[in-house]
Image (cartoon, rainbow, N blue to C red):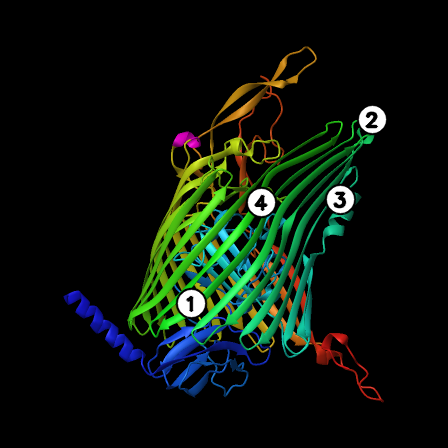
């Protein structure tokens, strides 16, 4: 009875407080371009209660019928609105950029949830880069808890996870493959991006199906006020961006990027004397988005992405004929989304999408004799999905986000077509379905305590195997002081697909996605974390430090001795399953947010292990990408109105490797001499897996950006100068054993008279590399011409005349 009285008293207090409250909601946008501002701060000036805009720029806040709401976003003028309404109200807010010295411009950092890393597009473009092209994922690697797979790679290793445990969302649509040139560059074009966030733990219940991180990339919708664009060229690629309005209610944005060294590689290899081989490599990206604002409550989006890498090699062997190798890999993505404001308290977004990743390897021989053949190996995965998510403000201190998602997937891990002297066809293809339903509650029981309590339920089915997984999520933030917060999280996540790949830095892709089956069960992870966040000196400095522990189960990898599926029709037979993984660590990150000098410093200490029954004799070993210590230092300085300077220094513990502990002589039955005797070859005896450690990795990159205007049409132009690896550090990419310092590996037969001692040598990839790039920005006004009879410039694109 006493409990019922307490509950009734609590409900009466809630009702009393809620009575007389109204809800204001809408979108916060850039006043000039109409782009939504993601992460803008919306605060009730009287109570200091507030929220931030979501990935669509939408906000919803409850207050008294008369109140003052303050809207702010870094780099924009703060706007305070005195609001009075008797009913819930929907309206849009437009913020202007602060460009004059006497304007009050927001300098404090926008609120970023715990365990979520963010870098603005402006910061990414300032970071010095190899080749002069800014890279989204490489910039992410400067943040604590996020490491690189290998030098110059854009693949992410997040808190001890693998590259295949990261979910990449492009406007809430999963993108399966995200790298070019074996990880040298990512597929994301910065010109297309509005906002980027990467969640390392404490996933909201809306997200799942990957164990390590959620990389959420919101694309821009295009300028609604005018036509504009940019063109850039560097030593690696050229890029083009166009955007503008379509009629009165729609806008578009298009970006494209293409490598420049395709023909140069082909020409260079052709001019080498005595070389019968020619090679060419290139890639391209195409992004397009159309946004249509039907009315103030409904908006439609249409997205397209297509990107491919292609490696070609031609070889002429005289009388033996001509051979060719063609390797192509990449993505297709189509999606459409619908945002609907049902009321001031209810907002939803829904969408349909199709994505496909495929890897195709074609080998052909055209001989003078009758021995022609063509081998085509293909591996692919296709995903057709439908989703919907709704956010409802139940009470002033309680909101709930709920929804569902369903996918039909087709995996073809192995497909081999052979024609010619050897003709055959074999394919292994399987369909699966996955559906999930979630609810995420945001509750504020006390003024200084915020709770996110959620549950995600996943149903997965493939052939005769099906499973249901319940994934609880908990995220609690405690306000210790106005500028100090403590955060605790726990989450359980499952993943119903596995990425198989051979470790190393290869130009040609070898990644193959395989589905979870009865013999290769879904992987899962449980992670707990604790973090402290503080702001100092009027928010000039932000500091976040934390610790985490992650346990991973049912991991999968290639069995020892296998590096691909090209020769294995029964692909499940080469997969090692049942792996266990553990990762725990401490992270520290401090950032200077404004001033003449800005920048950040990050440090991470971690321990990451793996264990499989049939690898390393069943004993636990260090993960292939285990780096206990990682440090990053980034500095930015605005020198003048035209010049700015940027520098990045990174240090990481060297990667582990498996050392040799002895040598032995083996018989080679396939190497027979004229007398019918088998040759003897030398083989190394290796010790425990990953028990050795390479030299530490570190380098310094610097960059200068010069902003100017062209003389004739007064176009904005930016010259970017950068130097990668300034002090020419020879960082190890791999180790190998040899009897000399050349890169020729020993494969000769062993005889008594040619025995030589072996030493350990390293291979380094990138020395000091200077780069330069040029980018030109233009708009409609730059192309107007004055004539005696008036302006004769007409363009169908602007829908004028």
Q: Residue furthest front?
A: 1
Q: Nearer the viewer, residue 431 or 59?
A: 431
Q: Is residue 443 above or below residue 766?
A: below
Quadrant for the N terminus, please. bottom left
**Residue 285 placement (x, y as % from top left):** 66, 57
Rounded to the nearest whole Å, what is the CA distance between mark 2 and mark 1?
67 Å
Mark 4 or mark 2, whichever is nearer to me: 4
**Residue identifier under label 4:** 410
**Residue identifier under label 3:** 269
Q: Are marks 3 and 4 in contact (CB under 8 Å)?
A: no
Lateral position of residue 672 relative to residue 66, left or right: right
How many marks the image carries: the answer is: 4
Rounded to the nearest whole Å, what is the CA distance between mark 1 and mark 4?
37 Å
**Residue identifier under label 2:** 369
Mark 3 or mark 2, whichever is nearer to me: 2
**Residue drawn at the location 31% of the way across and 81% of the way down:** 19
Q: Is residue 617 magenta?
A: yes
> What is the magenta range?
614-618
Tell me the number on the disc at residue 112: 1
Disc on the earlier residue, 3 or 2: 3
Rounded to the nearest whole Å, what is the CA distance between mark 3 and mark 2?
27 Å
Mark 3 or mark 1, whichever is nearer to me: 1
Classify mark 1: residues with Cα within 10 Å, few (<14), some (14-19) or many (20+): few
Rounded to the nearest whole Å, what is the CA distance between mark 4 and mark 2?
40 Å
Disc on the earlier residue, 4 or 2: 2
Mark 3 or mark 4, whichever is nearer to me: 4
Classify mark 3: residues with Cα within 10 Å, few (<14), some (14-19) or many (20+): some
Disc on the earlier residue, 2 or 1: 1
Q: Is residue 778 visible?
A: yes
Disc on the earlier residue, 3 or 4: 3
**Residue drawn at the location 61% of the way across and 66% of the way down:** 191
């Amino acid at each position: 009875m006493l409990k019922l009285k307490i509950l009734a008293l609590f409900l009466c207090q809630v009702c009393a407080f809620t009575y007389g409250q109204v809800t204001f909601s809408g979108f916060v946008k850039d006043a000039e371009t109409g782009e939504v501002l993601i992460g803008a701060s919306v605060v009730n000036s009287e109570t200091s209660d507030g929220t931030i805009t979501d990935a669509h720029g939408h906000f919803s806040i409850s207050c008294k019928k008369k109140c003052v709401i303050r809207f702010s976003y870094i780099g924009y003028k703060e706007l305070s609105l005195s609001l009075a309404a008797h009913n819930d109200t929907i309206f849009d807010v437009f913020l202007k950029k602060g460009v004059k010295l006497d304007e009050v411009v927001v300098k404090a950092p926008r609120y970023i949830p715990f365990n979520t890393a963010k870098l603005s597009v402006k910061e990414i473009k300032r970071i010095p880069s190899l080749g002069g092209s800014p890279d989204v994922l490489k910039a992410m690697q400067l943040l604590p808890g996020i490491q690189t797979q290998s030098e110059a790679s854009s693949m992410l290793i997040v808190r001890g996870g693998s590259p295949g445990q990261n979910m990449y969302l492009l406007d809430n649509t999963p993108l399966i493959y995200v790298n070019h040139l074996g990880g040298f560059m990512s597929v994301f074009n910065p010109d297309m991006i509005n906002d980027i966030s990467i969640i390392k733990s404490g996933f909201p219940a809306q997200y799942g199906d990957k164990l390590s991180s959620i990389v959420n990339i919101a694309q821009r919708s295009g300028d609604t006020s005018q036509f504009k664009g940019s063109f850039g060229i560097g030593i690696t690629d050229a890029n083009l961006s166009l955007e503008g309005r379509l009629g009165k209610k729609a806008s578009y944005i298009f970006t494209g990027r293409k490598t420049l060294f395709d023909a140069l590689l082909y020409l260079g290899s052709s001019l080498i004397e005595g070389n019968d081989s020619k090679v060419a490599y290139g890639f391209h990206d195409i992004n397009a988005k159309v946004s249509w604002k039907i009315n103030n409550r409904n908006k439609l989006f249409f997205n397209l992405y297509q990107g491919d890498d292609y490696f070609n090699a031609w070889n002429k062997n005289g009388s033996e004929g001509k051979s060719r190798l063609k390797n192509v890999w990449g993505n297709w993505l189509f999606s459409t989304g619908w945002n609907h404001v049902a009321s001031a308290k209810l907002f939803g977004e829904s969408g349909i999408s199709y994505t496909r990743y495929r890897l195709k390897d074609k080998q052909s021989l055209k001989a003078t004799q009758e021995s022609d053949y063509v081998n085509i190996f293909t591996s692919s995965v296709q995903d057709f999905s439908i989703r919907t998510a709704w956010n409802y403000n139940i009470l002033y201190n309680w909101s709930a986000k709920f929804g569902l998602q369903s996918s039909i997937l087709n995996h073809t891990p192995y497909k081999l077509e052979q024609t010619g002297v050897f003709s055959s066809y074999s394919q292994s293809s399987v369909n699966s379905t996955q559906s999930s339903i979630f609810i995420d509650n945001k509750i504020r029981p006390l003024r200084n305590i915020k709770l996110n309590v959620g549950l995600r339920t996943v149903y997965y089915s493939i052939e005769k195997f099906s499973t249901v997984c319940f994934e609880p999520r908990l995220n609690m933030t405690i306000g210790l002081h106005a500028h100090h917060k403590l955060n605790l999280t726990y989450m359980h996540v499952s993943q119903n697909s596995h990425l198989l790949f051979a470790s190393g830095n290869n130009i040609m892709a070898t990644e193959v996605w395989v589905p979870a089956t009865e013999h290769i069960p879904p992987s899962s992870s449980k992670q707990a974390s604790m973090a402290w966040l503080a702001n100092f000196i009027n928010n000039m400095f932000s500091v976040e430090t934390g610790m985490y522990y992650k346990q991973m189960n049912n991991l999968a990898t290639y069995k020892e001795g296998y590096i691909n599926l090209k020769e294995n029709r029964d692909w499940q037979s080469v997969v090692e399953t049942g792996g266990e993984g553990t990762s725990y660590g401490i992270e520290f990150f401090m950032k200077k947010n404004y001033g003449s000098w800005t920048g950040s410093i990050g440090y991470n200490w971690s321990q990451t292990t793996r264990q499989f029954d049939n690898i390393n004799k069943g004993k636990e070993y260090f993960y292939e990408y285990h780096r206990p210590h990682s440090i990053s230092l980034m500095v930015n300085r605005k020198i003048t109105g035209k010049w700015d300077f940027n520098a990045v220094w990174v240090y990481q513990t060297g990667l582990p490797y498996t050392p040799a502990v002895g040598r032995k002589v083996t018989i080679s039955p396939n190497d027979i001499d004229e007398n019918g005797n088998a040759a003897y070859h030398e083989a190394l005896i290796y010790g425990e897996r990953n028990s050795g450690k390479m030299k530490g990795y570190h380098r310094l990159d610097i960059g200068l950006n010069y902003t100017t205007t062209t003389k004739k049409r007064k176009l904005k132009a930016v010259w970017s100068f950068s130097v990668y690896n300034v002090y020419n550090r020879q960082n190890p990419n791999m180790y190998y054993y040899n009897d000399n310092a050349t890169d020729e590996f020993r494969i000769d037969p062993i005889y008594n008279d040619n025995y030589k001692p072996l030493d350990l040598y390293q291979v380094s990839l990138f020395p000091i590399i200077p780069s330069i790039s040029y980018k030109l920005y233009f708009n409609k006004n730059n192309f107007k011409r004055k004539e005696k009879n008036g302006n004769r410039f007409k363009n169908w694109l602007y829908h004028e005349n």
